Amino acid sequence: MPVTIKDIARIAGVNHSTVSRCLNDKPGVSDAVRAEIKKIAEDLGFEFNANARGLNTSKTNTIGIIMDEDYQTANLHFFTNAFLRHIRQRLEKEDLDTITTFPRNNVTDKDNIRKLVKRRRVDGLIILCSGITRETVDFLRDRSVPFVFSHKIPSKKLGQVNAVYCDHYRGGYLATDQLIKRGCKNILCLVREDSRDEFFQRTRGYEAALKDGGLPLVPEYIVPGGYSLNCGRETVKRLEPLLGSIDGIFAHTDILALGVMKELKKRGIRIPEDIALIGYDDIELCTYVEPELSSVRQPTRDISLETCDRLLRLMAGEGLLERTVLPPQLVIRESC
């Protein structure tokens, strides 16, 4: 006769629900008990029926990851890949699969999140984008689907939500303060043309550092930039009237900083001798250029792990509602 969960429970001296939690890798059981029960199951040749588990518990053991619509733009592509790598590694430790998609179907314009939930394809969601409506959030709450916003700052209009992201105000402050400490007096802020709060916070940090450093805020020094490396030429054209006066640049993204660096060097402007430059995100390309780009590093790994752990706790029934803001780190290289 095949070995059952009740057989394992009898041998281990525990109830069958404890055995089930151990074999499902659910919380609430000590590591020692979990290890003992799994060893007993292995010794008895017990085979856990994953399909039956899904039928009995209505669990899919799959997590949905909702990406930003503009993921394919260079800066997001480089940066978000790091998040996905850490998230996948953490979830695979829990034997969980992932489905990656976008908020809406580009062809039908249907809501992909609602589709995943209605078809019962996921047990929870990690949302790596900011363009989520209050209606979608209310839908997830009504369906009791655990979800965590990660990296992107969710709108306050969504009410209380679980979220994990970087302190972008602090990041903007650190970058600008370093330029001031280097002796820069006329510091430009190249802003991402985007309404998302993370970029607004970076600009606020820039403004606060200028104030604390005793430097005036010059509105003309806050200049819109682009989304890709190819935008560097157009951005520098906007800066031409200012190139004789500015001696430092804080760029909202590394991609924007790298594009501008290339065009400035073409004009014979030395970095950092003539203009010091700091980007944001600390993507891998920062160390593949000359001079190497200084940047504000987001705690990618910590954000990813905290996101996954938060979601796992929600899936286990914990009633959490909080935002966790993690500190960035300034990485000083040759450009500053």
Image (cartoon, rainbow, N blue to C red):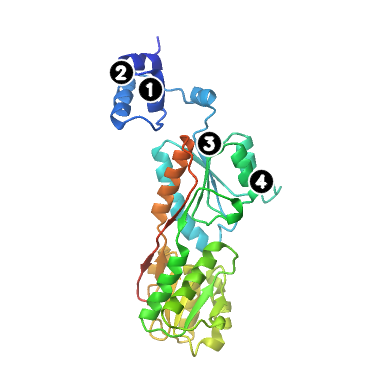
Q: Is residue 300 above or below residue 118?
A: below
Q: Quadrant of residue 219?
A: bottom right
Amino acid type, callout 2: Ala
Q: Secondary structure at mark 2?
A: helix
How far is mark 4 from mark 1, CA to CA? 39 Å
Q: Which mark is residue 19?
A: 1
Looking at the rendered image, the quarter that the C terminus falls into is: bottom left
Q: Earlier in the sequence, mark 3 or mark 2?
A: 2
Q: Position of residue 140 (x, y in %)?
A: 60, 41
Q: Earlier in the sequence, mark 4 or mark 2?
A: 2
Label 1 neighbour load within 10 Å: few <14, some 14-19, many 20+: many
Q: Secondary structure at mark 4?
A: loop
Q: Which mark is residue 123?
A: 3
In the image, taking residue 127 as reference, residue 14 lies left or right, namely: left
Amino acid type, callout 1: Val
How far is mark 3 from mark 4, CA to CA? 17 Å
Q: Are marks 1 and 2 in contact (CB under 8 Å)?
A: yes
How far is mark 4 from mark 2, CA to CA? 47 Å
Q: Position of residue 120 (x, y in %)?
A: 59, 34
Label 4 neighbour load within 10 Å: few <14, some 14-19, many 20+: some
Q: Identify the residue position indicated by label 4 in the image.
A: 111
How far is mark 3 from mark 2, CA to CA? 30 Å
How far is mark 1 from mark 2, CA to CA? 9 Å
Q: Is residue 90 visible?
A: yes
Which of these two is toward me, 48 or 124?
Answer: 124
Amino acid type, callout 3: Asp
Label 3 neighbour load within 10 Å: few <14, some 14-19, many 20+: many
Q: Are marks 3 and 2 in contact (CB under 8 Å)?
A: no
Q: Earlier in the sequence, mark 3 or mark 4?
A: 4
